[in-house]
Amino acid sequence: MVRTLTLVTGATGMIGRALVSDLVKRGDRVLAVSLDQAPNDWSRWIEERKVVFKRVDLRNLVDVLALMTEVYSVFHLAGVKGSPKLTQQQPASFFTNTLMFNLNVMEAARRSGVENFLYTSSIGVYSPAPILFEDDIEGTFPSINDRFAGYAKRMGELQAEALKIEFGWDCVSIVRPANVYGPYDNFDPTTGMVVPSLISKAIDGDGILKVWGNGSSVRDFVYVEDVAAAMIHLMDISYRKPVNIGSGVGHSIRELVQLLQSEIPNLEVVWSNEGPTGDDTRILDITRLTSTGFLPKISLEEGVSRTIEWYQKHRKHSEFRYNAFYEHRKSNLE
């Protein structure tokens, strides 16, 4: 059988939406897989067979193997992300789900002869340091603040190495994104990451934004469109060394909050010492990425403005998305 499909797992997530759009626009035929329902705005693509949508639980290896029949390329995005508080309260939701997604998708791709595979790792695999370089992962351990998700992502990288050694399957590109944000993010104020959760609380609240910590923590924020474009670029050139995808610039949480205040009128900020804030600094070195000819384009100011505008128009979107942290309360798999 001729292989004609590019598989995107986690296709209805934030990065997945941007990636599917870019792939379709350039002429790829996409097999989009998710635990959500097919987005309404994909209807035309689905009718025209530009997108084949399947609702599949990637924790079932038999179902994942069945996906691979016509697949020649895989962008594996499916995973679980959440706030520092959730890493303490619901670590199994990170660890178990991520491990099962990775093991099944990578193994199924290897068995099926897929020749180009992108594995989405994370900034969370790194040990704390002022600047995070790809090669510094050797001999270190993920931060205590991100150990469950960090180790799960590292296991995916180790799986790729094991398959290369035993089976000669040298087909995996590994990317380690920074703090990705943008449209279709998880804006749940309880389970979302810092940018979307602050945006939703600022817009949906009573004009008072409560922020954990004192705002001194520094993060590398990268807009989702830059991440999707970088992923496609690295797959196109079959780049096989691990690559950081970020802005390469650090911004404090206080700077982020000030941006929100400039975009949202009459927003009062209250700083609180309640809740964990994670590592003090997380900035990726992106020299390896830029050496391949790719440069991120969207500044934090532009990206936050775009994200606020999107959320104001689509704030109900997140109510219908699969959320791993609520799975134990009410199943989203039925």
Image: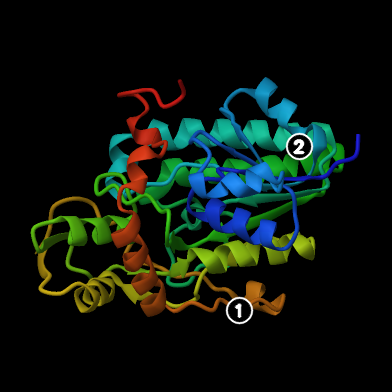
Q: How many marks?
A: 2
Tag 1: amino acid: Leu
CA neighbours of label 1 inside 10 A, class few (<14), some (14 to 19), many (20+): some
Provide residue 78's location: percent of width, then percent of height.
Answer: 55, 42
- Indicate left or right for 217 with 110 as reference: left
- Say which residue label 2 marks: 109
Q: Residue lying at the far right in this picture: please name it.
A: 1
Of residues 129 and 195, the one drawn nearer to the viewer in this rendering: 195
- Does label 1 or label 2 sit earlier along the sequence? 2
Of residues 107 and 183, the one drawn nearer to the viewer in this rendering: 183
- Say which residue label 1 marks: 295
Q: Residue at x 80, y 49 (%)?
A: 171
Q: Residue at x 50, y 44 (%)?
A: 39
Tag 2: amino acid: Ala
Of residues 245 and 334, the one drawn nearer to the viewer in this rendering: 334
- Indicate left or right for 162 with 256 as reference: right
Residue 299 seen in the current view: yes
User: Which quadrant holds residue 278?
Assistant: bottom left
Q: How is the image coloured?
A: rainbow
Provide residue 41's location: percent of width, then percent of height.
Answer: 52, 50
User: Which quadrant holds residue 219?
Assistant: bottom left
